[in-house]
Image (cartoon, helix red, strand yellow):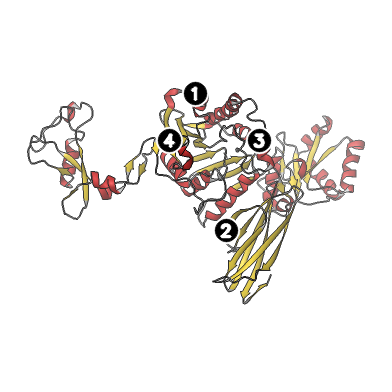
Amino acid sequence: MSVNKLILGDNLEILKTIERETVDLIYLDPPFFSNRNYEVIWGDEGEIRSFRDRWAGGIDTYIVWLKERVEEMHRILKTSGSLFLHCDWHANAYIRVEILDRIFGIDNFRAEITWQRTNAHNDAKKKLAVLKDTIWYYSKTDKNVYNPVFGAMTEKYVSEFYKYDDNDGKGKYQTVDMRSPNPRPNLMYKYKGYKPHKNGWCYSLETMQELDAKGLIKFPDNESGRLRRKMYLSEQKGVLLGDVWTDIQNVQGTSKERIGYPTQKPEKLLERIISMSSNEGDIVLDPFVGGGTTVAVADKLNRQWIGIDQSVQAVKVTELRLDRQHGLFSAPFTVQLHKYDYDSLRYSNAFEFESWIVQQFGGVSNAKQRNDFGLDGKMQDNTPIQVKRSDNIGRNVIDNFFAAVQRSDKKLFDRNVAKKKPVGYIIAFSFGKGAEQEAARLKLKENIIIKLVPVDKIVPIAKKPTISVEINELLRDVKGGHEIELIASGQSKAGIEFYSWDFEYSPEKGFRASVIIDREGRQIAKFKAGLHNIAVKVVDNDGLESIEAVKLKVNGTVKRTE
């Protein structure tokens, strides 16, 4: 299964292509069921098409739509895997009873996590304010991965519980009971005169001696008292948390991680979920990628990941987030769109393109590249395939291919001719008149079929957008530099989705967005004296993109040097 991949498309259809029991963790934040139509967030064609009429039949329509997706998620989860479904009060009860309990089973319910995402505002004077979301937590089986969750200790908590200090340099500590919670007949022994609880100790004699040697046992003055273990503050990870999370704030307007996505979830929330229910190297799936928080956090935590969304903007914004946080040792990732850029395919590495397009066509690529008669692959029945990464292929290609397929396997050639099947396939970006005429002649006069297959009949192709940038110096008194207006203008038959800007662009490091989403293509920025590299990226409705880089020299005036 391909991982570290962003996929543009209907998540139901894509989920169906994923192999059974291959994913470790799924987090989904689907559009909430509501009487208002705020579920359309990005507003691009793919999202609108996906959400149109989804709630025409009320709650039943919504539950059916979500249930068939969760059924596929359950199928692809490993036996040790877990699912977290994020929702609000509008449908949380229906989702649990009608979907999760039925698909996962009541025995695999793990928690109803309540996340307090905000505090009450003035409208709470008129009615009780809704401050929380629900995150349903289910596992595939009772063998699920679980790592305890810890929250930060408050000053009040520390002062109440960590009361002791032996002034030995180890700091403050609290004490905890050393009795077993259940009867342990094999642990009923005296230790230094102290009697065990009626259930026995929770430690073996050997462990008790080790703790004592390390000074981790607090002995009461009277042997009738209870031994207690010392737990030092400096050694604690935090406070063990349960199913109510009040310590993670929603993404604020001034937050550095804010990207302009209205329902963006904070990274700390996903850090907690991913750390709690997966380990490094595990596969994390988000079928509603939205603003990209899940895959961005999974990437930071050294998990493998898959992100799916119907929206071009969701996929491209997530790609920009990943680009911005990627470093030298980051794992590479791929983006799968509805359409492929002609220039990227036409001028890509020849062998990589040949191998890829043969596989897209349903064939098997030739890995040898030697003694292959110039053939690049074969179909499942061994019929040869040749790939030409060129336009306007001429007749000579047909002649050479005709000879090659006979030399490679004459029996197969004769058998295909007899059955009136293609003796071979030639894949190219376009074919000239001579090639088409010769292929037609062979079929008409000699009953030999050589199938000419344009690349755009195998994969959809489009031209990437064009872009230009205009620079205007604003005559305003600004402390610390010059204020400059930058105007980007993109052109695409598909239509322009948005622009992104990198004000410290480096071709070596790649595009790292300073501004991720700019719907108008206009920015006003302040630049100090010196040379500045600026780049703007335009994204169209097909998800294709172009970058324009400019150099500005600021020194009393503003001059475009390139």
Q: Secondary structure at mark 3?
A: helix
Q: Choose the circle earlier in sequence order: 3 or 4.
A: 3
Label 2 crowding class (10 Å Cα cut-off): few <14, some 14-19, many 20+? Answer: some
Query: How far apart, in angstroms, are the residues tagged by discs 3 and 2?
Result: 30 Å
Query: How far apart, in angstroms, are the residues tagged by discs 3 and 4?
Result: 29 Å
- On residue 114, which mark appears? 4
Q: Choose the circle earlier in sequence order: 3 or 1.
A: 3
Q: Horizontal and vertical percent for residue 120?
A: 44, 41
Along the line of sight, the residue nearer the viewer: 310 or 75: 310
Q: Secondary structure at mark 1?
A: helix
Q: Is the Cβ of the residue at disc 1 closer than 8 Å to that at disc 2? A: no
Instruction: Give the residue displayed 71% in from the left and 44% down from the top.
Output: 339
Which amino acid type is shown beneath numbered disc 2? Answer: Ser
Q: Secondary structure at mark 4?
A: strand
Task: Name the residue that disc number 3 marks.
Answer: 50
Task: Name the residue that disc number 1 marks.
Answer: 97
